Amino acid sequence: MKEYGTDRLRNVALVGHQSAGKTTLVEALLYNTGAINRPGRVEDKNTVSDWDDDEKEKGLSFSTSLIPLEFEDNKINILDTPGMTDFQGEIKNAIRVADAVLVAVDAVAGVEVGTELAWEYAEAYQQPIIVVINKLDRENADYNRTLESLRASFHDYKFIPVMIPIGKEANFEGVVNLVTMKAYMGTGKDRSDLPANMQAEAEAARTALIEAAAEADDQLIEKYFSEGTLSNEEIRDGMRKAAKDSYLKTVPVFVTSGAKNIGTVPLMEALNVYVRPPAERRVRVIDAAGNEDFLTAPQSDDGPLAAYVFKTVNDKFVGTLNFFRIFSGSIKSGGSFYNVDSNTDEKFNALLTMRGKEQITVTTLHAGDIGVVAKLNHTKTGDTFTTRSKPLHIAKPDFPEPLFAVAVLPRTQADSAKMGVVLTGLCQADPTLRWRQDPDVKQTIVEGMGEAHVNLAISRAHRLGTNMDMEIPKVPYKEAITKSHSDFYRHKKQSGGAGQFAEVHLRIEPNPGGGFVYETKIVGGSISHSFLPSIEKGIQSVLGEGVIAGYPISDVKATVFDGKEHPVDSKDIAFQIAGREVFKKVFADASPVLLEPIMLVEVTVPEGMMGDIMGDFNQRRGRVLGMDTQGGKSVVTAQVPYKEMMRYGNDLRSITGARGIYTMKFDHYEQVPPHLAAPIIAAHVKEAEAS
């Protein structure tokens, strides 16, 4: 692969709902450019994009693939993203480093939840959007219905067809280019005159195209008002400006069938024309003082180095591969570059670009290009390469909180020794994946955006040589009291030798939000000061294991107000035991309760489904806090116990037909209703008796 300068580069994030045909469309583009001899099929597990073993096995895209296309002396870096909402991190990072977003929409299904999510991210980064209505060869495919679906879902935008289909469903055979008013049959390499029966439709669509192009430029709109038309080149110039300007909210629309390879060459021509070159990008950065700044256009090799690592792949055989986008400056193979996040210099021994899993060695990557480097030691996803003399951070995306958790258990001692290292590596590669040791439930927890996301992480750990089993995590309950209580405990032990003696009088009271507080109010020296820390140590030994159900104790104030000691038999261990036992005794008589975590949940669904969501929340012991409407969608906010939300993603998908999305974060703790707490406490008592 030859070198491409900044003006010859185009970076496009290909996004859309699961099964919108993105991977199949990429196969057609690769075939048209000669990169492959025949298009692969997802069903045959031989596509370039879905090269990972898990992707082949499931027939789904789980991660972003870098697919460079060499077309008309340009390199178009396609970032083929997964469509499942579980993999929001992959989608968000791909959009972050692209210069335009190509949204693939299924001509049968229309706008879906994955479409909306990707659109939201494109808006957040003010990225120009292009739409391709794909799968027009399918039964029940309808171009006009899909276009109306887009307009209804994103009513702030103007959707302007640049291509319209010739034929429909099984008879879809080409596209009309509304700029040239020619028919492009098949792939679009061959041009011919318009079918006579499409002349009127094409003329009307061309008028709308000319008006949209004119609105993007003052000179063009003046000419249009005076002459009533624009030249083909002026239409292209106007639409180029409209498409590249995210504020105009003008979206060019193209039509294809990836499976039948129809309309794909005009789509690549459009990417060259309507996607801005990287030189025109303004880049938001954080300077050394932590202040937001911007690298203003044009970007070039002469600018300060700013390269952002947006993806990391851990491979058992290849090692670590870091994917990066150069926003400014250039990178040469063999050079050493400064990672500002890890404060280390990293040697780029092997500089690559990749086409799926195919590694292509390169010597230089210029400003705006996307590349890969192997075997770095101190670099993870989200890091920035820059210079020590002018350090910059590329602003990172904000990632949502995890929604799905599992507890993992290593299968063998060897797996246990490697588990932490492997999980840390996977989480460093994927910012939406997390793991932690939870002392409250004494489990290792892995959290992600959904069941498929977490299952993929465990599968990748297996491929890296670490086997783990999964189970549903325990709910992190806490124990607390609802009233004050006082009592004492005397510890006395005589066994023929030195004895043990300690008596402690203790008062405990609720301390909402204040955690554990220990005080002493000893009068008259009934207990020596040297033994007071021993009492606290004994109490502390109970806090982590609980009294009534085996869960940590929260928000209690304990006050030692009296006691007795023996001049010979009183010692540290005696007061530890007395402190432990008196606390357990008093706690049990202070009306103890279980507390459960309450989550703040926000669900976005089509308007007609709001009642179903609210009814479901009621069954989950939730409290609806508010309802709102945003862009034709209903947004329901509620507080719901964590126990009822642990597998909510699967249920929401079932309730809404995969049309709903949600966010969830911890809010506060509340008392578990007595009828639900009783079996939890009884189970703990039974377990304790059995042991």
Image (cartoon, grey):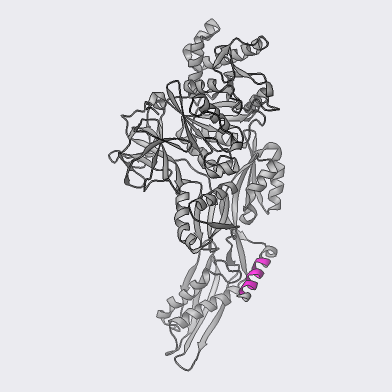
Residue 673 image position (x, y, % from top left): 67, 62
Q: Is residue 42 visible?
A: yes
Left or right: 637, with 370 as reference point: right
Q: Quadrant of the C terminus?
A: bottom right
Picture layout, residue 395 above or below residue 584 = above
Magenta-tinted stretch: 679-688
Left or right: 153, with 461 as reference point: right
Left or right: 537, with 393 as reference point: right
Residue 667 image position (x, y, % from top left): 56, 53
Residue extending farthest top: 227
Picture layout, residue 435 above or below residue 330 = below
Please check the rendered image and state whether residue 687 is part of the magenta-colored stretch, yes or no: yes
Residue 57 image position (x, y, % from top left): 58, 44
Residue at 49%, 92% (x, y): give it. Answer: 495
Residue 531 image position (x, y, % from top left): 43, 80
Residue at 52%, 39% (x, y): give it. Answer: 51
Looking at the picture, tell me which residue is in the foreground, 645 or 81: 81
Residue at 53%, 48% (x, y): give it. Answer: 401
Q: Is residue 292 visible?
A: no
